Amino acid sequence: MTSMPPARPHTGSHDLPVPAALDAFMATGWAPSPLPADARIPGHALLPDRRQRLSARFPGERLVIPAGTLKVRSNDTDHRFRPHSAYAWLTGLTGEEQPDHVLVLEPSGPEGHEAVLHIRPRSPRDTSGFYRDRRYGEFWVGRRPDLDETAALTGLRCAHLDELPGLLAGPQPPTRLLAGVDLRVDGLLPARSHTPSGNAELDAVLAELRLRKDPWEVGQLQLAVDHTTSGFEDVVRALPDALRHPRGERRIEGVFNLRARTEGNGTGYETIAAAGAHACVLHWIRNDGPLPPSQLLLLDAGVETDTLYTADITRTLPLSGRFSPAQRDVYELVLAAQEAAIAVLRPGARFRDFHREAMRVIAEGLHAWGVLPVEPEEALADDSGLYRRYTLCSSGHMLGIDVHDCARARAETYLDGVLEEGHVLTVEPGLYLQPDDETLPPELRGMGVRIEDDLVITADGAKLLSGALPRTADGVEEWMARLLDG
């Protein structure tokens, strides 16, 4: 019986054998390709203060903040990489070349830290990794800065990623870790050197330090909003083609996402393009339905800048170009709730106040329509909440590097806290009138309306960042007609 040759190990779909002659040839003849000596990351001058504020909260302790790891999408292909928001905020590094990198704030005295960035340097040309490593090789995924270049870009001392295991081995100072971001780093730290409660406190503090945005950050958010405004305009211009397509929602998604990728890093979250009853699904991202001309389109979308700050805007558009009487009634109730919520935004107001004010208007409107079975005051009571059948979620959230920014902050500093100058948030009341809800009159069933805007708290109130997009029913109709005629 003839024996079979040993099976070749499984390899990636693009792998080919590399003869010694090719390997030797690939190691020669490469010219230097340095980055410009004066290159700096955006917001470079702001980063030392951010790290100093974090340092001041944990004197004498080592702080470990990973960028995160690549995640497999399918077989041997990865999802596009985006670094963890805390890492990006502290280093300014936001690109796809950051997987596995780790920022360590090393205690350097009773009240200070030295920030050291552990990175994977460039693929050296005297080994085969630069053309054979499908995950990190530069021929496969692009150039990375070397250690000296990264130090110049960021102002941080940089060390080879291979030095991290030695740093984290043996006796350790008191350590806090942003846990769960990079399991490899989690495994390097002796369990006795850090505690879940200590790690949770680091996570919370990193979120709380990001609550107030500086002027540069507000500028980045305004840029994200401006690009998002352009994306909404693109969508309206594309409506005639999208209305004819059996999956018009995906045409809308694609049009907006094109703007997001050409103007920024992409979308800050999955675009919601929900027509008709799909708008009653709060996070509808299947986007596989048609655009019935008699229905509304709820578009919830945001461009993320290259610095990772995102907008978050929703508009509800009549696909015919004109609201029907019933659609207009629902739209104007939601708009009244949003206007009431915006009116209470100012420093010192409690964060929950604007939601409560929006829900008061919603409950009163539902009662006036004969939908609520009880008086508004009873529906709004903590032990009732009957109005929530038609508007299930909160009316807004903080906004920044994450679309739901600073979500790890402790309740006393965020949800149960007060607004401060520099907070950026969304205001987004909505009504979601399910198609099978028999408590509603037939003309209201299957309709979802949300109006969402982005605002920054100022010294005496709030500034509407997304004011370039119309909010009134008449304004939306006029805006759509102008874009479709132009």
Image (tube, rainbow, N blue to C red):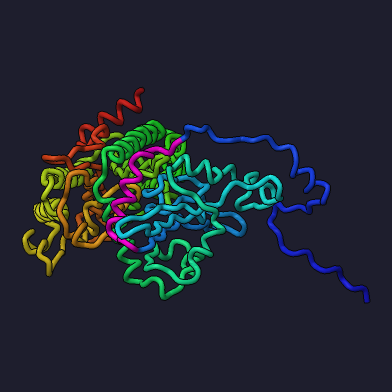
Q: Is residue 366 visible?
A: no
Taking depth in this image into account, of 449 and 305 the one nearest to the observer is 305
Q: Can you name the residue that lies furthest to the right here?
A: 1
Q: Quadrant of the N terminus?
A: bottom right
Q: Position of residue 138 (x, y in %)?
A: 62, 45
Q: Can you name the residue that lies furthest to the top here?
A: 486
Looking at the image, which residue is at 43% across and 39% down?
41
- 136 up-or-down from 190: above or below: above
Please tell me whether residue 75 belongs to the stretch shown in magenta: no
Taking depth in this image into account, of 247 and 255 the one nearest to the observer is 255
Q: Is residue 265 visible?
A: yes
- 149 up-or-down from 201: above or below: above
Q: Position of residue 247 (x, y in %)?
A: 46, 45
Asked where in the image residue 290 lies, by quadrant, the reply is top left
Q: Is residue 177 left or right of residue 280?
A: right
Taking depth in this image into account, of 185 and 380 the one nearest to the observer is 185
Q: Position of residue 228 (x, y in %)?
A: 35, 37
Over which residues does the magenta segment extend? 40-60
Q: Position of residue 449 (x, y in %)?
A: 25, 47
Q: Quadrant of the C terminus?
A: top left
Asked where in the image residue 154 lies, by quadrant, the reply is top left
Looking at the image, which residue is at 38% across and 60% down?
63
Looking at the image, which residue is at 14% across and 46% down?
345
Asked where in the image residue 198 lies, by quadrant, the reply is bottom left
Magenta segment main secondary structure: helix
Taking depth in this image into account, of 391 and 64 the one nearest to the observer is 64
- 37 up-or-down from 270: above or below: above
Looking at the image, which residue is at 52% across and 32% down?
36
Total marks shown come to: 0
